[in-house]
């Protein structure tokens, strides 16, 4: 099958005319510019006038459609993968919460045993907590916060079958940065839920951390006399930063500032979505705590923002249409950059020969018209 279009998103971060040939579930050939006569005669999808972008990559979210990854059931994982695929997010790295060691063990073990047959591809797990700061716990459950512990981490990693692609840590809780140095040999270490000042965060990055969990949220403010984690990340060249661009977590002006500082090559847009995503307003839970959802806003009883009620595709639209982020930058931040940040870009994140044939076709209003997953059209509108 061939996908032909005038606005296909290339790895160079621009839209170009060309064609994509699919064989089985992979991209077998990409031709930029004019389409050959041989290709023109093959079975094709004509995306003329539309945008063809890689399947989105969400490396940090918790749930959707009434279920949570921390339910730890195959049924929940089936619901999550199906919903995400339907909304153009074809590669996912769901996140755990700060829970008891016993609860986390069951979740990681279930994930390790899950045999996926449908939906978006689970490309790993984001271990968000319990190695965080109580002062910046946000919607995490403070009762289960734990000092950074390699034995704890390795038990979860073994139970999951090596699926943990990222682990969150508050560096001020890590004595002599011992956990960061050791964990960085095995996975991506992300600075998260932290009171760290500039020097503490900078040292964490020098010791092996190279990621920031939902930047601006769950950390000290970006202050002109103490730029804290954000300033340290900016000064640490190979560090990626996550942002929740749902229109609730970060003011549009700060999103524009962040793109100016870090560029789409270092920003990973995430949804941080919870189980209310794709559902009606009402009462839900996150990490065992009650959450009230009204519109896009999800809060605990004390008013703390508790994840988001938006999927990554919705965040992309908000970033472009409401925050004035260029479409090319938003697409890059939702695809190749997050894939690169966790080292999963060999299979996903861009339109390149050998990668999985995952695409989203958008109209001029950025509404989804088609989703192609593993070479098959799974959504067509």
Image (cartoon, grey):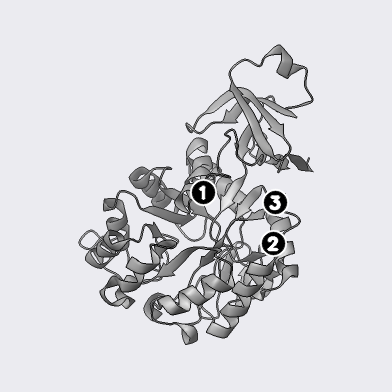
Image coordinates of residue 140 in percent, x first then y, are 50, 77
Q: Earlier in the sequence, mark 3 or mark 2?
A: 2
Q: Mark 3 vs mark 1: give the one in front.
A: 1
Give the label on residue 80, or none: 2
Res. 52 in view? yes
- 75 horizontally vs 228: left or right: right
Image coordinates of residue 90 in percent, x first then y, are 65, 49
Name the residue at the bottom extreme: 143
Q: Residue at x 74, y 38 (%)?
A: 24
- The one of 238 and 196 positioned closer to us in this rendering: 238
Spatial CA distance of label 3 from label 2 is 9 Å
Q: Mark 1 vs mark 2: give the one in front.
A: 1
Q: Which residue is mark 3?
A: 85
Image coordinates of residue 89 in percent, x first then y, are 64, 50
Quadrant where the C terminus is found in the figure: top right
Q: Secondary structure at mark 3?
A: helix
Image coordinates of residue 200 in percent, x first then y, are 25, 67
Q: Secondary structure at mark 1?
A: helix
Q: Residue at x 61, y 62 (%)?
A: 309
Q: Earlier in the sequence, mark 3 or mark 1?
A: 3
Q: Secondary structure at mark 2?
A: helix
Spatial CA distance of label 1 from label 2 is 19 Å
Name the residue at the left extreme: 225
Q: Which residue is mark 1?
A: 339
Quadrant where the N terminus is found in the figure: top right
Spatial CA distance of label 3 from label 1 is 16 Å
Tell me whether the residue at label 1 lies in contact with that at label 2, contact meaning CB atoms closer than 8 angstroms: no
Q: Is residue 329 above or below residue 115?
A: above
Q: Residue at x 64, y 42 (%)?
A: 356
Q: Earlier in the sequence, mark 1 or mark 2?
A: 2
């Amino acid at each position: 099958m061939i996908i032909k279009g005038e606005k296909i998103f290339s790895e160079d971060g621009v839209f170009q005319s060309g064609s994509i040939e699919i064989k089985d579930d992979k991209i077998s050939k990409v031709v930029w510019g004019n389409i050959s006569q041989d290709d023109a005669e093959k079975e094709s999808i004509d995306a003329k006038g539309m945008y063809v972008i890689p399947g989105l990559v969400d490396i940090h979210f918790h749930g959707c459609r009434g279920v949570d990854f921390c339910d730890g059931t195959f049924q929940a994982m089936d619901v999550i993968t199906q919903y995400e695929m339907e909304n153009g997010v074809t590669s996912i790295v769901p996140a755990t919460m700060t829970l008891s060691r016993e609860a986390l063990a069951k979740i990681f073990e279930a994930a390790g045993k899950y045999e996926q047959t449908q939906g978006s591809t689970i490309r790993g797990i984001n271990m968000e907590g319990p190695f965080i700061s109580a002062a910046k716990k946000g919607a995490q459950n403070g009762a289960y916060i734990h000092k950074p512990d390699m034995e704890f981490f390795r038990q979860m990693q073994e139970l999951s079958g090596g699926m943990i692609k990222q682990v969150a840590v508050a560096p001020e809780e890590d004595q002599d940065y011992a956990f960061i140095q050791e964990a960085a040999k095995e996975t991506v270490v992300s600075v998260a839920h932290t009171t760290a000042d500039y020097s503490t965060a900078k040292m964490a990055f020098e010791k092996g951390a190279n990621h920031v969990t939902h930047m601006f949220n769950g950390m000290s403010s970006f202050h002109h006399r103490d730029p804290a984690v954000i300033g340290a990340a900016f000064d640490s060249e190979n560090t990626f930063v996550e942002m929740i661009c749902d229109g609730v977590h970060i003011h549009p002006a700060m999103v524009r500032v962040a793109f100016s500082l870090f560029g789409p090559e270092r920003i990973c847009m995430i949804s941080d979505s919870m189980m209310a995503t794709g559902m009606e307003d009402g009462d839900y839970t996150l990490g065992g705590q009650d959450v009230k959802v009204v519109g896009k806003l999800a809060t605990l009883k004390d008013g703390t923002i508790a994840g988001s009620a938006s999927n990554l595709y919705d965040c992309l639209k908000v970033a472009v249409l409401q925050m004035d982020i260029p479409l090319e930058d938003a697409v890059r931040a939702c695809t190749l950059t997050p894939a690169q940040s966790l080292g999963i870009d060999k299979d996903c994140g861009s339109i390149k020969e050998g990668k999985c044939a995952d695409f989203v076709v958008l109209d001029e209003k950025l509404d989804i018209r088609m989703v192609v997953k593993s070479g098959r059209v799974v959504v067509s509108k």
